[in-house]
């Protein structure tokens, strides 16, 4: 079975920003979370996969299909949820169903209606009068109601209330459970990723810092805390990001570098949030 998604040396330049040489792949049956601070290139990466933006370099395949040479075939494999509404604002959910049935031969109206009901969406209201979370739920209902191999979701959980968010995470796990499909979703809510992601791709200032198994990522880093007197210049150099105060210090360090921690410093597991936040504070560049 081919990889569900492959990016090879993908680059795109805007004024003041460049997505540089991004390469990663996603195998069937897995969920990958795309993280990084505001403006780091997550939406740009997702739009390049959707060919909504032209890349300058590199190539992208979806289920083995080149996303430019065979664009419509590739897009049929993808269920896409944008960070903004993609439907005509004057449409009601029933108009979305009509349009989906025209564009996609695998669209299942019954399934769509079941999701409309499950996501508690009104049938008789125009999309322009939907809240942000309702718009996201509608795009999810549409994306989940046809046969796809990849769900490509741009911050799908950020506008959702906790109950629907938990439900969505269950839906995503269900989606990949037969081992033939995958999910790539960007988010700032790293606790969602701690729950369901198998892989984490971390983009910062247009560069892919890593795309790795989540457990390996968590095993790779530690938080070290201590008193100011324990922080030598030598130790400072080891930190990826460091916070100092008169009371003490706390920083992110590679697990290997934490092995010879000075006596009485505290070394703890790092969360994904710690890993993202400390990487963006500056300090040592990744090897
Ligand atoms: N069409 C465009 N024209 C010019 N610059 C753009 C365009 N699209 C994106 N950018 C720039 O590319 C950079 C990355 O933006 P992008 O939306 O990919 O970030 P992001 O990681 O998704 O951020 P956020 O977490 O805030 O959604 C930003 O500096 C943005 O201004």
Image: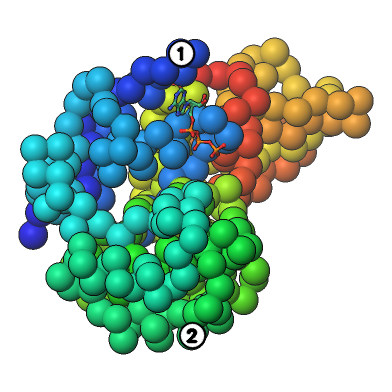
Q: Position of residue 72 (x, y in %)?
A: 15, 50
Coloring scheme used: rainbow
Look at the picture and state if 195 lies above or below 12. below
Q: Residue at x 48, y 85 (%)?
A: 117
**How far is disc 1 from disc 2 in space, using C-alphas?**
44 Å
Q: Report the residue marked by disc 2.
A: 117
Q: Position of residue 220 (x, y in %)?
A: 47, 41
Identify the image quadrant of the C terminus. Answer: top left
Question: In the rendered image, which quarter is residue 81 located in?
Answer: bottom left
Q: Residue at x 23, y 71 (%)?
A: 101
Q: Which mark is residue 153?
A: none
Between residues 88 and 53, which one lies in front from this camera angle?
Answer: 88
Q: Position of residue 35 (x, y in %)?
A: 49, 43
* Any part of residue 169 in sight: no
**Mark 1 Cβ and ligand 1 under 8 Å apart:** yes
Q: Report the residue marked by disc 1.
A: 15
């Amino acid at each position: 079975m081919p990889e569900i998604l492959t990016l090879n040396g993908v680059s795109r330049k805007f004024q003041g920003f460049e997505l540089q040489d991004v390469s990663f792949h996603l195998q069937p049956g897995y969920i990958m979370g795309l993280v990084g601070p505001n403006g780091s290139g997550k939406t740009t990466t997702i739009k390049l996969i959707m060919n909504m933006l032209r890349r300058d370099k590199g190539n992208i395949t979806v289920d083995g299909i080149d996303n430019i040479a065979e664009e419509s075939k590739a897009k049929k494999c993808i269920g896409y949820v944008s960070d903004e509404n993609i439907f005509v604002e004057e449409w009601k959910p029933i108009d979305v169903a009509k349009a989906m049935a025209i564009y996609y031969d695998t669209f299942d109206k019954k399934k769509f209606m079941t999701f409309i009901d499950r996501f508690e969406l009104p049938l008789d209201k125009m999309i322009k009068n939907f809240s942000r979370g309702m718009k996201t739920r509608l795009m999810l209902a549409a994306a989940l109601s046809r046969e796809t191999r990849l769900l490509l979701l741009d911050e799908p959980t950020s506008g959702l209330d906790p109950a629907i968010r938990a439900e969505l995470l269950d839906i995503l796990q269900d989606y990949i459970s037969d081992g033939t499909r995958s999910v790539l979703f960007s988010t700032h809510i790293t606790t969602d990723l701690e729950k369901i992601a198998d892989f984490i791709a971390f983009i910062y200032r247009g560069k892919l810092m890593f795309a790795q198994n989540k457990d390996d990522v968590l095993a790779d880093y530690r938080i070290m805390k201590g008193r100011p007197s324990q922080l030598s210049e030598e130790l400072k150099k080891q930190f990826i990001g460091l916070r100092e105060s008169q009371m003490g210090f706390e920083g992110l360090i590679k697990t290997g570098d934490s092995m010879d921690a000075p006596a009485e410093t505290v070394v703890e597991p790092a969360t994904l949030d710690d890993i993202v936040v400390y990487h963006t504070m500056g300090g040592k560049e990744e090897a």
